[in-house]
Amino acid sequence: MNAEAKIAARSSLRFQRCALLLCLFSLLALIFPPAQADAETQNALIPSPRSVLGFTPGDDRKIADWKQISSYFAQLDRASDRVQVQTLGETTLKRPFIVAFISAPENIRNLSKLKEIQRKLANPRLILSDTERATLLREGKTIVAISCSIHSNEIVASQMSMQLAYEMASATDAETREILQNTILLLIPSANPDGIDIVADWYRKTLGTPFEGTDPPELYHHYAGHDDNRDWFMINLPETKLVTRLFWKEWFPQIVYDIHQQGTDGSRFFIPPFYDPPNPRIAPLLLRQVVLLGHKIAADLQAKDFKGVITNAVYDTWWHGGFRTAPYYHNSIGILSEAASAKLMTPVSITRDQLMKATSRGMPSALSTATNFPDPWPGGSWRPRDIMNMEMTAARSVLSMAANYRAEYLRNFYELGRQSISSKTMTASGEELVAYVIPPGQGNDEAIAKMIGALVEQGVEVHRLERELHGEYGAQTIVRISTAAGYREDGQRRNIEGEILVINRVAQEEIPGGGYIVFLAQPYRSNVLALFEPQIYPKRLTATGEAERPYDVAGWTLPMQMGIEALAVTKIREPVTERKLALIRDEAEVRRDFGLAQRRGLASPIPNPLTRPRRLALYKGWVDNMDEGWTRYVFDTFNVPYESLRDADVRDGNLSAKYDVIILPSQRMKEIIEGNQPRSYPQELTGGMTEAGVENLRRFVEEGGTLLCFGASTELAIKRFNLPIRNVLENLKSSVFYCPGSILGLEVDNSHAIARGLPKDVNAYFINSAAFEVTDPQRVRSIARYSSNNLLRSGWLLGEDKIKGKVALAEVPLGRGRVILFGFRPQHRGQTWGTFPFIFNAINE
């Protein structure tokens, strides 16, 4: 073929190709509108998790760490106009904490406008007319927050988050488009990024060894471990602060879905409805919505033939302080799911015998069919992929409901806020409770600043009283009642005993200026009540008379834990004008009120309370211990220098040459002495301080040292040092004595140096705690006893006669030193500021 012929042939071929492409584009234009065709082209370019990670999330024995997860979300942000990733701040260990906003492109472009709509719906006082309200309800979107793996050994959800984000960013089906149009998803890949790396590093290190799939031999949150999900009213941790600001200051989600895992042997998946009892401060409408959403998820799982789904079991709605419980007190729906775990990312095999033995509240066995458990799982292999598939289905169910019933969710959210502002809260005597006041001059300014700061951070309105008010107020007390005219459920006549909350009036009627006041007429009325009033947990016993254990704790009244007087106001006799009030913006403002200047060079603004240098050591074994973590948190917050004391250090001895004070946080004696059992971990991580270490501790005290024992660790000192004191609660059945996380009163001998500056009446937190009887009064100094009257302050106490008047805090000399025995935990979860002074005084002396 000559040159001219070749040129002609190429031209003809180009023409044919152009004609073919033109036909193709014309056909595409007929099938897909131009915008949809553009979307299809863009979605094809969105990176899948597999293309970035080299594996698909949920694959056996594959794990993505935080850098991989956050990097994937960054790539998704760049590739998709449906995704916008924001870094909210830094974690405890300085990793980036991210949230991904996922919605339709037009919603992503208008996030500022949609956020303002939410702000107004959350606080109906900002809406000026019915017309404005109608516009907001019409234009607003359902805000859904989904949070993954706050407990980072419950690892699968963090991996699943990437797949969920990818599908929401790339799918073009009708359901996904409806979800994107009507909702904004706030996807938190993990509420504990530090823990994701701790777990991922340990898993990779042990992969292919006998220890594959074990939990890391350390707390997977630097301070809180598992308790990182117990911080949602105290707001101690950086991660909690970031999410709280996102939720209750900026976006006000209508639905919060918190994804967890549970043990391997029980049901495969828990989803609400929850087990009783509900907290009376949760709006009934919210409880109904939780049930609706939970049953929708359960039905969708069943439709996909997932077995082993249970409702109405184990988990209740009494407790305040968790990721999914805090929303109830902010007019939002809180959903929890708990999938059965594998061994991190390693499959497990579960036998029928294991399932037969698995029991819990609401589940006689994991093989028994019931209305709340209609399709048990028969056993077999259980893989991370199974967990992920169930979590993906549940997440899609939540989003689908949020999209389909957008208008209802927004309207109900608005109405709950409006009712909170306008409704009345009545006392037992028929009076209206209108506010709580924190009087000035209490002498614990740091605690007040912290408490008010925590309230403001979670959206509660707190005002400074610039001038006095005239009204009626008093202290709240739980009072035991008995009537002779009641009937049991079986119809037999008997005395009915119970407890009610009363307000004991004070004589004066002037509410002094300079203090702080929290009015109930605000959108988060239920949050104020749930934190300020004493809890009265309903007495719940099993058929055998044993106490039915509540989920987490029974009482938590915040001012009581913090040693702060907060009085209930039942009447204000004059108009409350703006001249008399100033809205508090943050904790720093309260600190300025008290003249608590920011200290340069300190980890926190709180100065070290120790009055002299002390060489302080805190015991830290290889058995992870949240009480140890919270003790470190308290010391770091108050800038108290300390060293961690490991098992090998205790075994080496010569402790008195290094330390003046050693603290054993609450931990069972067996764990302290024996540590992790042989072959459960690598050899260097097994064993405890041993009997030799115990002897070295004794020698440390005898040579002049001070040993502080909190809670369960008192057993070691009492039994191994033969101290003349015993725990009267040891081995008692719960039918005889039970007190599951409650606040009890102490009678304090404040003439003792360890109680210096404390009042004679103090509230202490009792959880798995001890009560002492002295066998040699000449050798033991009692510093505090459990109150003989008005013992239960908040929560549940069964068998109070076993503990009334018993010793709660004692000093026992030993050689030239002394042992300080705390029956209670004086630093519980970093919340009990009212008993922190006991710790600092004991270290000081």
Image: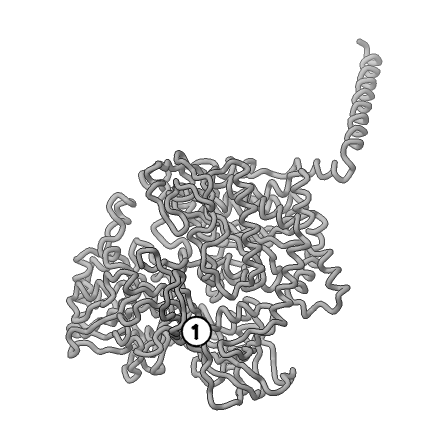
Q: Position of residue 482 (x, y in %)?
A: 38, 74
What residue is rendered at 24% in x and 54% in y?
A: 688
What residue is rendered at 27% in x and 76% in y?
A: 805
Report if residue 726 is visible in the image.
yes
Between residue 159 and residue 372, name the one nearer to us: 372
Q: Position of residue 473 (x, y in %)?
A: 51, 83
Q: Quadrant of the C terminus?
A: bottom left
Relative to residue 422, is residue 211 drawn left or right?
Answer: left
Report if residue 829 is visible in the image.
no
Between residue 411 and residue 464, name the one nearer to us: 411
Q: Quadrant of the N terminus?
A: top right
Q: Position of residue 3 (x, y in %)?
A: 81, 13
Q: Which residue is mark 1?
A: 500
What residue is rendered at 55% in x and 45% in y?
A: 297
What residue is rendered at 64% in x and 85% in y?
A: 575
Relative to residue 30, is residue 614 drawn left or right?
Answer: left
Number of disc labels: 1
Q: Is 244 located above or below residue 777 in the figure?
A: above
Q: Image quarter for residue 784?
A: bottom left
Relative to residue 546, is residue 600 drawn left or right?
Answer: right
Residue type indicated by callout 1 = Ile
Q: Position of residue 562 (x, y in %)?
A: 42, 74
